[in-house]
Amino acid sequence: MASDMGASYGSTLRYKSVERMKPIGKHSLLGASGEISDLQEILRYLDELILYDNMWDDGNSLGPKEVHSYLTRVMYNRRNKFNPLWNSLVLGGVKNGEKYLGTVSMIGVHFEDNHVATGFGNHLARPILRDEWKEDLSYEDGVKLLEKCMRVLLYRDRSAVNKIQIAKITEEGVSISKPYSLRTFWEFTAFRNPTVGAEGSW
Amino acid sequence: MTKQHANWSPYDNNGGTCVAIAGADYCVIAADTRMSTGYNILTRDYSKICKLADKSLMASSGFQADVRALQKQLSARHLIYQHQHNKQMSCPAMAQLLSNTLYYKRFFPYYAFNVLGGLDTEGKGCVYTYDAVGSYERVGYSAQGSGATLITPFLDNQLKSPSPLLLPAKDAVTPLTEEEAVDLVKVVFASATERDIYTGDKLEIVILNANGIQCELMDLRKD
């Protein structure tokens, strides 16, 4: 899973080091877009969920499927009360060798797929993923593919920042990379003289 | 002084089409597997068909979150029924339950367009068709969802339903064989896919008869 680390407040880039991906329990990874304060609230809910699950101390632990189901109910019920949590969530994980990836929107619309995205990612990244994702993608190739998507988003999404993290989740656990930037190329001729085809533009 | 408008809607239309055809001793329920929002495709592989009981299947299109909530509600109620009565709910009983469940939220409706298909207590195919607030009717065949307007006239033509005004009421169940009905469904979805942008990707067909339940998946155009 990849996400950038920017959090805007309207047109202001307010926060530049926000971790929008968090491990949940032993088997899951949550990524979120939207209202950061609502994400923090969701993390509190999930913290309590995992805590109560651990307190049973029965050797069982909530897997990504269960956490995703919980989140879909939470989001849907808030929507029913006309007070939504303003987030788009991505929930991925591995449990007992079985991988899982799902998403929930702020009104409770949810599904699983081999690749998901939030916000502009649906417009710019999903088409790339539809073309290049395959079942036996290696981790390294997966990272390259995600970086390709994030690069396109960086070029074309006004609110994107060039500081990303990649998170990996396997049976062994979760690891979230240190923040790093993508290499970009701005020397295209069209970028050199951007107004050559539109005199008076800026 | 202009009226204040909400900046978000609790509803969305995730598209899709559902069809069901009742036969003498079978029922065919079909739906596409595309889930969209606006002009985007969210996923190409989402099932809109839910088995509520041994002899009742529901296909629903509309707002996916509401559809899912409705499916969970009905499945839970069926489980309670089984505990209390030690038997499966019949299709006509499930039909009434679905109607009541939908009307319960008359003033904040489930944005779900449902088609219930199954076998009645005599083993004959039955199809019930609904609107979003629970108004329902037993019919020989039905289409709901974004492609319904494209499909229904064609089914009317092919399945030659007797006039509902006739007395005594003539059975609307189709004389087609199971194979012919499945073929008709495939043809009908292929056509709807051509012109309806929300229908496509894959077609999921479920056939319910005395032998049980069979599933079939057919590819549709992905554009």
Image (cartoon, grey):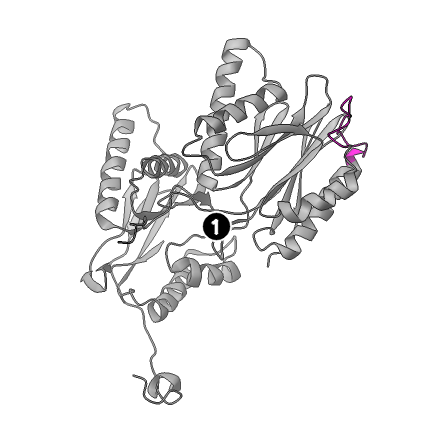
Is B195 or A189 nearer to us in this picture?
B195
Is B57 or B99 nearer to us in this picture?
B99
Kindly indicate the quadrant of the structure image that contains residue A118. bottom left
User: Relative to residue A171, is residue B199 drawn left or right?
Assistant: right
User: Relative to residue A3, is residue B159 drawn left or right?
Assistant: right
Please name the residue shown 52% across and 52% down the image. Answer: A135
Please name the residue shown 59% across and 16% down the image. Answer: B88
x then y, percent, for residue B29: 66, 35
Indicate yes or no whether the magenta region holds residue A77. Answer: no
x then y, percent, for residue A115: 45, 52
Q: How many marks?
A: 1
User: Relative to residue B65, is residue A179 drawn left or right?
Assistant: left
Q: Above or below — where is A110 with respect to A161?
A: above
Kindly indicate the quadrant of the structure image that contains residue A199. bottom left
Q: Above or below — where is B10 with respect to A12?
A: above
User: Relative to residue B98, is residue A192 drawn left or right?
Assistant: left
Is A35 or B111 nearer to us in this picture?
B111
Please name the residue shown 72% across and 17% down the image. Answer: B122
x then y, percent, for residue B65: 44, 39
Kindly indicate the quadrant of the structure image that contains residue A46. top left
x then y, percent, for residue A105: 38, 46
Label 1, residues with CA under 10 Å away: few <14, some 14-19, many ≥20: some
The chain that hosts pointer 1 is A
- Could you tell me which secondary element the residue under label 1 belongs to? loop
Please name the residue that numbered disc 1 is placed on: A114
Residue B61 appears in the figure: yes
Residue B211 appears in the figure: no
Identify residue type, mark 1. Answer: Asn
Q: Which residues are magenta?
A: B163-178
